Amino acid sequence: MVWNCINGNDIISIEVLRRFSMQIVGFIMGIFAILGMLFRLIPFLGWSNWLVIPFAGVDLIISIISVAISKRGGVGVAGIVLC
């Protein structure tokens, strides 16, 4: 299956879009994990880090899988670093 870009000249396979979207999801989850951990630095909210740690673990798994599938770095590696 193919999908045309907005300009109509480029043809991108659905598989490429899936690989890149998985990297974007890992990156966004990494940003949320960092923001969550920074928010938990407020006194009396440190106990809620136990909610962020599993979220960051899932993000790490998604980011590693996306880098392994796409065989490219970029946003997927940034998602790994953010974990």
Image: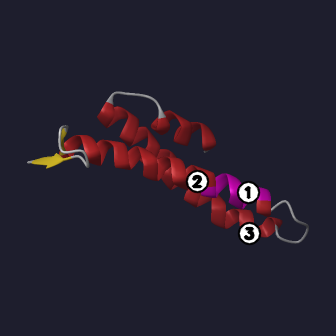
**Sequence-first disc among 3 and 2:** 3
Magenta stretch: includes residue 33? yes
Q: What amino acid is found at the position of numbered circle 3 in the picture?
A: Ser
Task: List the residue tagged with mark 2.
Answer: 56
Task: List the residue tagged with mark 1.
Answer: 37
Q: Main secondary structure of the magenta part?
A: helix
Q: Residue furthest left?
A: 1
Q: What amino acid is found at the position of numbered circle 2 in the picture?
A: Ala
Residue 49: image location, x then y, percent:
72, 62
Q: Nearer the viewer, residue 63 or 10?
A: 10
**Sequence-first disc among 2 and 1:** 1
CA–CA distance in space, label 3 to label 2: 13 Å
Residue 42: image location, x then y, percent:
87, 65
- Res 80 → quadrant: top right
Residue 69 shows up from this direction: yes
Residue in view at x 19 percent, y 37 percent: 10
